[in-house]
Amino acid sequence: MNFDLTEEQDMIRESLSRFLRDRYDFEARGKIIKSEKGWSPEVWGQLAELGLMAVPFAEVHGGLDGGPTDIMVVMEELGRALVVEPYLPTVVLAGSILQAVGGAVAEELIPQIAGGELVMGLAYAEPRSRYDLFHVETTAEKSGDGYTLTGHKSVVLAAPLAGRLIVSARTSGGTRGRDGISLFLIDPQADGVTVKDYSTIDGFAAGDVILDKAPATLIGAEGEGLALLEMAVDRGIIACAAEMTGLARRMTELTVDYTRQREQFGVPLSKQQVLQHAMADMFMAGEEMKSMAVRATALADADPAERAKAAAMAKVFIGKTGKFVGETAVQLHGGMGITEEMAIGHYFMHATMLDTLFGNRDYHQRRYEALTGLRKDAA
Amino acid sequence: MDLKFSDREEAFRQEVKAFLDEAWPAEKRGGKTDFTRENYLGWHRKLHARGWIAPAWPEEYGGTGWTPTQRYIFDKECAAADAFPILPFNISMVGPVIYTFGSDEQKERFLPPTLSGDIWWCQGYSEPGAGSDLASLRTKAVRDGDDYIVNGSKTWTTLAQHADWIFCLVRTDPNAEKKQQGISFLLVDMKSPGITVRPIITLGGDHEVNEVFFENVRVPAENLIGQENQGWTYAKFLLTHERSNIAGVHQSWRALDRLKKIAADKDLYGDAPSLMEDGDFVRRIAETEIDLTALEFTELRALAREESGGGMGPESSLLKIRGTEIQQRISHMFLDAAGNYGLPFQRELGHNEATEGPDFAVETAARYFNMRKTTIYGGTNEIQRNIIAKMILGL
């Protein structure tokens, strides 16, 4: 067993960490999320120059031939700095699918992603699906050489920024059937596509995507899209485990610093044992979260059953402990913790979003129980 | 990063398994564990004969030279086979103190019987007035010629009723400036005149701990470890010294496996739904599996740091806290699984022999109560949080 990072991975971490320290502090981030665009194409370009967008892709596509461990390193650093630029939807979610599908579409789009020219998103959720990836009401109809899609996709991360979206739609089967789901590529600018854009509570660009006979290109085998979707979302979950680790570690540092500076009753808050123990619990949560992220990362390329179990387990754990660290950090900051003025509350909001994203703790708890055979009645 | 075991590590696992199949055959597994002196020593001696009694010790003193990962595999396989614990007082506590701080004569005299089990050690640390605040201990040793004369009492002395020797922290300088100064580390023969042992019976009816009284006990000065008044250093070394399997992860996995079998056992439920059809119970099992996985990989990461020379350090507090919390949760789930038959108890026997209910239910309540000790001993979990706050977070 070996938990060590390679020299390249250490280099990625160091250069990214330095860049974010210099260019992406709390103030700079605040300006970005309050800007009209809600993200910084300039930062995106600079991250691309650092090679970030190329990390997981094959060299023939302009990639760096990295793997899940490299993504873990990147996501933990992005989490530490609360980066809102759409790395997860572009590189992890859409990137995983394009890589798996291969062929002409991968040859066309991956080099653009790797070069920082293309932002993408994955539209998997619908108003009535909650977290079930197989609940797909959106329909696809054959039309000439291609397809047209009709339906409603909800809370699609990066939808307002994306040059292309990957959308799940039904080519056959009933609303909640596991078969008959296919994946399509659409251009959000095309006729028949309306993106109702908004920002999430933690400052990320997102939107609902309304499809009315929108032109679309099938990617992957028709009717067999669910396996790809589950793979991509599990990769997303595993990446979020690393991101949450970055959040938790940073929240612990910020809380330790704050309680050291703030004096009440004539002593720094950090001298109060009840607060020390709360911070010890935060530290432990962060360490264990890291362990879960490492484990899930090591299983990201495993067979689907193992990968799914590892992802479900990790999601339960980061949901529970991430919320715990966030809530405790805010409590220890007192009134200042619930203002927009300090970084801590923004970390807490993002930690909360990461619990919800891809299915919350309860959802993945049931998924884990079903996958391990503990629960017989579950889907 | 590569979390698979290497071929060499897999081969080692097979070697351990083969040994266990021979030394601890299937008929000894899975049943009720009878923690008698003979059973403890029987297993201790088997491991000693194989040369595997003290894997973490330096090879020159009888260690195996295994990597931390090999030790992890060994612990895991032993737990999977329901093998007995080794005597921790000998192997994890006093042994390392003797080979690190003892004189050549002491090493020669004490290490072989400590390894073989010919000496059964017990630990004389806590006192009625010195628990978490160990340094306030008051048992005193006064020099008299070639001897020390020891007066005072020690408490929570685990299995002192079986012990041949006790290693003690005693106060040799009552006037030292700080209470941590003026403490010495003394080895005392339990057969010395003036020592009496009083059993303390805990909630589950167990006689596991004792109070040990010292009344004018003469201890040869040659039994002093290291320097007089430097005992606190050795005591702390003992407490923070690498303790393999401090989190009890393997035992907890084994217990969860048993619990799942019990919860699904149709013979126990007949026409009633089994516990595995009770969503709330299933959820508790699943949550514990997930938390235990997080703990297991935290331990593996700590082992990897140790393997690369980083040492375990204050992270061991995390393993202790989480490991004991999980052990308690599992013991609670067993009690709940027993249902009504968790209640009957034969206090007059000092343990439970059998109730009218299923076999597994016999020990569940006693064990649940017994496991309360885990978050209290070895430095309470609150003390462990103090250590994390001070040593890791710098508060």
Image (cartoon, coloured by chain):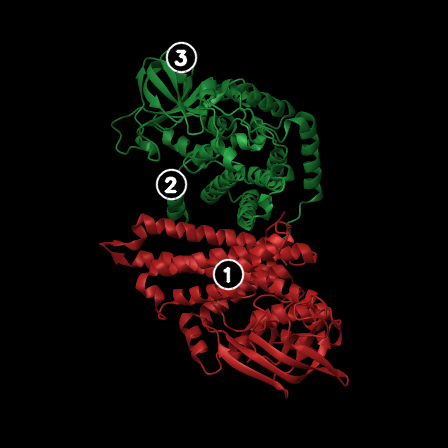
Chain colours: A red, B green
Which element type, helix, strand or loop, lies under badge 3?
loop
Q: Which mark is residue B383?
A: 2
Q: Crowding near pointer 2: few (<14 within 10 Å), some, many (20+)?
A: some
Labels 1 and 3 share a subunit = no
Name the quarter where the C terminus of chain A is drawn. bottom right
Which residue corresponds to the image point at 51% horizontal and 51% vertical from the top-left?
A288
- Viewer can see residue A34: yes
In the picture as drawn, the residue positioned furthest to the left comes out as A266
Residue at mark 2 shares a chain with residue at mark 3 = yes
Q: Amino acid at mark 3?
A: Ser
Relative to A88, A268 lies left or right: left
Give the residue displayed 31% in from the left and 64% down from the top.
A335
Q: Residues within 10 Å of mark 1 (few under 14, many from 20)?
A: many
The chain letter for the residue carrying disc 2 is B
Residue on which the image places disc 1 = A244
> Would you name the residue on which mark 3 appears?
B192
Whole-Å distance between the Cαs marked 1 and 3? Answer: 59 Å
Residue B105, how many percent across, how many down?
48, 19
Instruction: Name the spot of residue A307 as percent of width and height, x first.
Output: 65, 57
User: Which chain letter goes with mark 3?
Assistant: B
Q: Are marks 2 and 3 in contact (CB under 8 Å)?
A: no
Q: Amino acid at mark 2?
A: Ile
